[in-house]
Image (cartoon, rainbow, N blue to C red):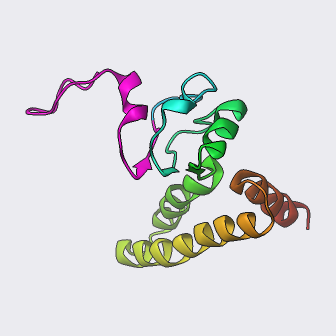
Amino acid sequence: MVEVYRGADQIEKEELLGLEVDLLCPCANSRSITVDNAGRVVARVISPGANAPTTARGRANSILQGVLPIPDCVANCGGVLAASMRRVRLRKDSVRRFVDQRFRQKVTEVIKAAERGNMSSRKYAERMAEGKFLG
């Protein structure tokens, strides 16, 4: 339960999945979306901040309901990339511009290519990463 934001309505964490939002960002725990609760997700897109925010069956259930799950390895790489760029002392505005332009473009490419290939965005991202790693 969120308790520190003054003036906010307090709800139980289990209610978060059912909020009518465009974007749901499960960021705290792994496997927050399971086959048991995926049916409550109302969001159009799930973009995680946590690693492995869904179980495989929960992700499959969400996809069947028309929810677009962005793979955690795709959603989280922008932050990792930005942190690495800052570590080598690139300017903050340069890092932000690069991540905004290139990262947005790559996420869009993953989603569209997965749709064209009639596969999940996770499967496409895994194949793309494997090809780059082994290629």
Q: Quadrant of the C terminus?
A: bottom right
Nearer to me, 6 or 96? 6
Q: Is 121 placed above or below 42 here?
A: below
Look at 9% across and 32% down and name the residue there: 6
Q: Is residue 3 left or right of residue 124?
A: left
Q: Main secondary structure of the magenta part?
A: loop
- Image spot of residue 112 (x, y percent): 67, 70
Say which of 57 and 133 sits in front: 57
Drawn side of residue 125 relative to residue 74, left or right: right
Quarter-of-image position of residue 63 = top right
Instruction: Provide residue 60's location: percent of width, then percent of height.
Output: 70, 39
> Does 106 sit above or below residue 68?
below
Q: Which residues are magenta?
A: 1-27
Q: Quadrant of the N terminus?
A: top left
Is residue 17 in the magenta section? yes
113 over 53 or under it: above or below? below
8 vs 86, nearest the viewer: 8
Q: Could you tell me residue 34's position as x and y percent? A: 61, 27
**Residue at x-position 48% and y-position 51%:** 44
Residue lying furthest right = 135
Residue displayed at 56% across by 32% down: 38
Count all numbered tags in the image, as a single digit: 0
x and y percentages locating residue 69 in the rendered image: 59, 49
Furthest-left residue in this view: 7
- Residue 19 lies left or right of residue 29; in this view the side is left
Position of residue 26 in the picture relative to residue 127 (left or right): left
Displayed quadrant of residue 107:
bottom right
- The quadrant in which residue 106 appears is bottom right
Name the residue at 17% across, 27% down: 4
Q: Is residue 116 magenta?
A: no
